[in-house]
Image (cartoon, rainbow, N blue to C red):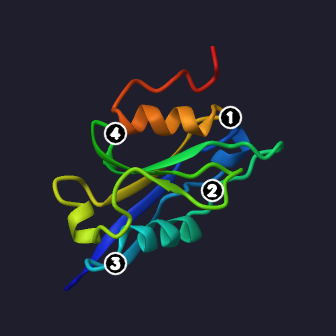
Amino acid sequence: MTNIAVLVDRDSVHPGDDYSSHEVEIEISESMRTSELLQLAKETCPLANISGGKATWFAYAGYWINRKNIAVLPQQWTSPKFLLDESLLASELFEGVEKIITFRYWCQIDPDVIYKALETNSELPDKYGL
């Protein structure tokens, strides 16, 4: 297997968080498991913690229009809840999508609600709870 370059990026959580880009590039083996890739992506592009401890994050591969949802990773959970087989190889994960992992911040919306929406490809709730 060969190595591939993957971009990793995350949403900003407040204006001061926009000081610099969060985007980083990592090089991984095509044989890396999705669970390992997600852990490395989080270490390389750390997710912001929110006062109160209830930030809801989720990760996907590709771009929003053509994406593969990977996992929900709320601040209050000790481990991610995967939306696909976590042993999927990186080469399989990036089949048909761009080589980018994005972490989206969905405020303090209940992570179980986000998981269910992503699992069923339903519309996400308003991230501001309006």
Q: Along the polypeptide, which appears first: circle 3 or circle 2? A: 3
Q: Amino acid at mark 3?
A: Met
Q: Secondary structure at mark 2?
A: loop
Q: Nearer the viewer, mark 3 or mark 2?
A: 3
Residue type, label 1: Gln
Residue highlighted by disc 2: 47
Dots 4 and 1: beta carbons under 8 Å? no
- Mark closer to the chain start, 1 or 3: 3
Mark 3, secondary structure of its residue: loop
Q: Nearer the viewer, residue 94 or 119?
A: 119
Image quadrant in which you'd find residue 14: top right
Give whichever of discs 2 and 1 has the lower sequence position. Answer: 2
User: Callout 2: few (<14), some (14-19), or many (20+) C-alpha neighbours within 10 Å?
Assistant: many
Give me the residue at 35% from left, 57% from top: 100
Q: Quadrant of the C terminus?
A: top right
Numbered label attached to residue 64: 4
**Distance Cα–Cα, label 1 vs label 3:** 31 Å
* Residue at the image position 71 percent from the left and 50 percent from the top: 76
Quarter of the image holding residue 67? top left
Find residue 108 and name its label. 1
Residue 39 falls left or right of residue 48: left
Left or right of 109 on screen, residue 123: left
Residue 32: give its label. Answer: 3
The residue type indicated by label 2 comes to Leu
Tell me the kind of residue under disc 4: Trp
Residue drawn at (57%, 46%), measured in percent from left and top? 57
